[in-house]
Image: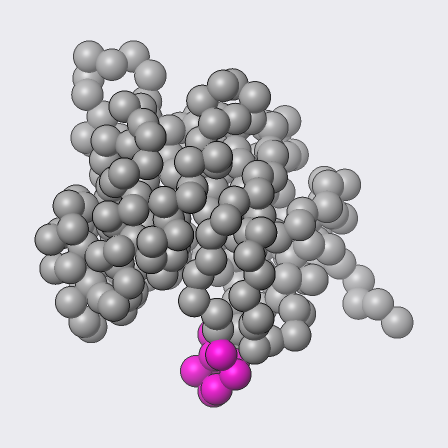
Amino acid sequence: MDTAVIIPAKDEADRIGATVTAARALPGVDLVVVVDDGSADTTGRVARAAGARVVRHSRNRGKAAAMETGAEAVRLLDPEEVGQARYLLFLDADLGETAGAAAPLTEPVRAGEADMTIAVFTTRVKLGGHGLVVGLSRDGIKKATGWTATQPLNGQRCLTRAAFEAARPLAHGFGVETGLTIDLLRRGYRVREVEVDMAHRATGGDWHAQLHRARQFRDVTRALLARRALPRPSR
């Protein structure tokens, strides 16, 4: 039992229970930490009832802050007598039962073949957007490192503790995945993509969804600017 699952969550009471239950059944997982990032619903209560350790932010601080809080909680819970820190498996709160398909993400890290794995969903959910943020992230990562990511914004990732610490402080908010990939590749860490049969709730096309994409675009742009990796717009 050498892996901890960290799940940042905000207002996910309808799915967090199933996600936690599936995550707890993953091979090698002995700890699931849910970071309730200022939810206005019963996310924390449902997660705790499903067997997760819950850490709560009194206000919404964003995904990157939730990831760092979760990683710190795991560090504090790591047994002192164990020489090696737990591997960190980050999962989205809305995966539901498909979180149970995350096991392949841990295998290359456990085997010492990768320092971070990134999920590539084999089941593609039709999204309401136009791929602008994905394209921005992919082009920025390629400009910065020469590596082309298939799903650069995928939040399902497994890391060694050393790799996670090397990437801190994480890029703000929704820029965290883009910044994490660039920072680790630039530092010589091994990053591998892994296909998994998982799916999360698709973002729709209403104004709430458009606002979400605008925030994503803003945060990814900031992460790329900070790393001097903002791609030039195509003509």
Give whichever of 233, 89 is nearer the camera: 89
Tell me the quarter of the picture where residue 161 sits.
Answer: top left
Residue at the spot 47% in from the left edge and 58% down from the top edge: 199
Tell me the quarter of the picture where residue 125 sits.
Answer: bottom right
Queried whether the magenta region covers residue 211, the answer comes back as: yes
Expressed as whole percent of the image width and height from the top left, the position of residue 101 reads 42, 44
Residue 106 seen in the figure: yes
Expressed as whole percent of the image width and height from the top left, the position of residue 145 reads 72, 40
Give whichever of 104, 76 is nearer the camera: 104
Expressed as whole percent of the image width and height from the top left, the position of residue 86 reads 32, 26
Residue at the spot 76% in from the left edge and 41% down from the top edge: 146
Residue at the spot 56% in from the left edge and 21% down from the top edge: 113
Residue at the extreme bottom of the image, as rendered:
207
Location of residue 78 with respect to 7 vertically, above or below? above
Residue at the spot 62% in from the left edge and 66% down from the top edge: 133
Q: Count of labels shown?
A: 0
Q: Which residues are the magenta region?
A: 204-212
Location of residue 219 with respect to 6 vertically, above or below? below
Give whichever of 31, 40 is nearer the camera: 31
Location of residue 181 with respect to 126 vertically, above or below? above
Residue at the extreme right of the image, as rendered:
235
Chosen colour scheme = one colour
Q: Is residue 189 left or right of residue 60?
A: right
Which quadrant: the C terminus? Answer: bottom right
Queried whether the magenta region covers residue 15, the answer comes back as: no
Which quadrant: the N terminus? Answer: top left
- For the stretch drawn in magenta, the main secondary structure is helix
Expressed as whole percent of the image width and height from the top left, the position of residue 10 reads 29, 64
